[in-house]
Amino acid sequence: MTTRRLVAVLGIVLASVLLSGCVALDTPPDGDEGPDVDPEAVFEGAYVHADDLEDVQGNRTSEVTNGTVTVTERLRVHERPYVDERTEVLNASDPETIGNLYVSNATKNWFYYPDSQVAQYFEPDEPFESESVKANRTKMAERLLEQYDIEYRGTERVAGRETYVLDVEAKNETVEEGISAIVGDTKYVYAIETSSPRRELETVEQTLWIDTEYEYPLREKVVFEEPNGERIVLTERFESVSFNTGLEDETFAFEPPANATVQDIS
């Protein structure tokens, strides 16, 4: 498989670094999910976070590998749930993507590609409202809980913070085809030279690491399998993260450079 076939195209980028060694998992005894840990409630944290979470910033890296070829991107992330976001590619396997910028606020979403000097924007008919987005995410989590079996595996530290670890398993094959990476709302399309890659890939494993304090996902691992049996592993992980640092509105504003070609993709 070539690098081009393995590239993950990020719609709303995010991720985190895959470390060479994992911290030992603190697993609860059989039949004991640990004190006051409700796996389904923890899973909802991937979509609807703690009420006192005001903002998030940090570095995260996404890695996709088939064991032979590896594709990575490292990003700087700023976020205020559930509308404001800013991500910039700091380093990547593909040098042309370095510097790519995504900026989202209530009235406009910007995609800026400095290599080609193109700035694209999407303008909704009505401004996004954080509470409305939160309500939709709540409904999505409720729907997914009907489709997934959630197993609590204990705790592990990610980016210096304690996280709950969950295994997510589809209840049937139809749902299995639709499982995708959910950390930070990232949407991935795998360029594997097929007209319908989602139909070709089967999800065989998914694990989430969710911050115990702010109910925010800090790491995810998804294992896909191709029809020929080859496995593709997507890992996302924050390598550093800070919460409630007081991000300003200016962080989520963008003005394209004067020499940029501006395109309306609304």
Image (tube, helix red, strand yellow):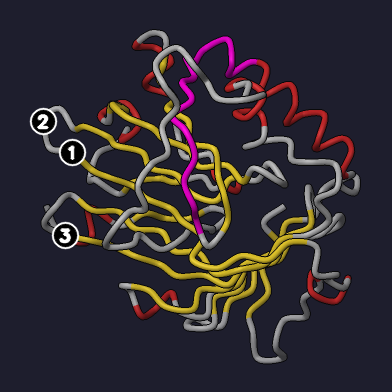
Relative to 162, residue 48 above or below:
above
Query: Residue at label 2?
Result: 229
Total marks in image:
3
Q: Position of residue 191 (x, y in %)?
A: 30, 49
Residue 111 image-quadrant placement = bottom right
Which segment is the magenta one?
143-158
Q: Is residue 179 above or below residue 103?
A: above
238 left or right of 62? right
User: Measured from the top left, where is residue 66 in percent x and y?
Assistant: 17, 49
Sequence order check, earlier mark of 2 and 3: 3
Q: CA distance from mark 1 to mark 2?
A: 6 Å
Q: Residues within 10 Å of mark 3 (few under 14, many from 20)?
A: some
Residue at label 3?
69
Q: Position of residue 174 (x, y in %)?
A: 39, 12
Tell me where residue 163 sits by quadrant. Answer: top right
Q: Is residue 183 left or right of residue 104?
A: left
Q: Label 3 near label 2: C-beta < 8 Å?
A: no
- Mark 1 in CB contact with mark 2 (< 8 angstroms): yes
Q: Which residue is mark 1?
A: 231
The front one of 125 and 50 is 50
Q: Amino acid at mark 1?
A: Arg
Task: Say which amino acid is labelled 3.
Answer: Val
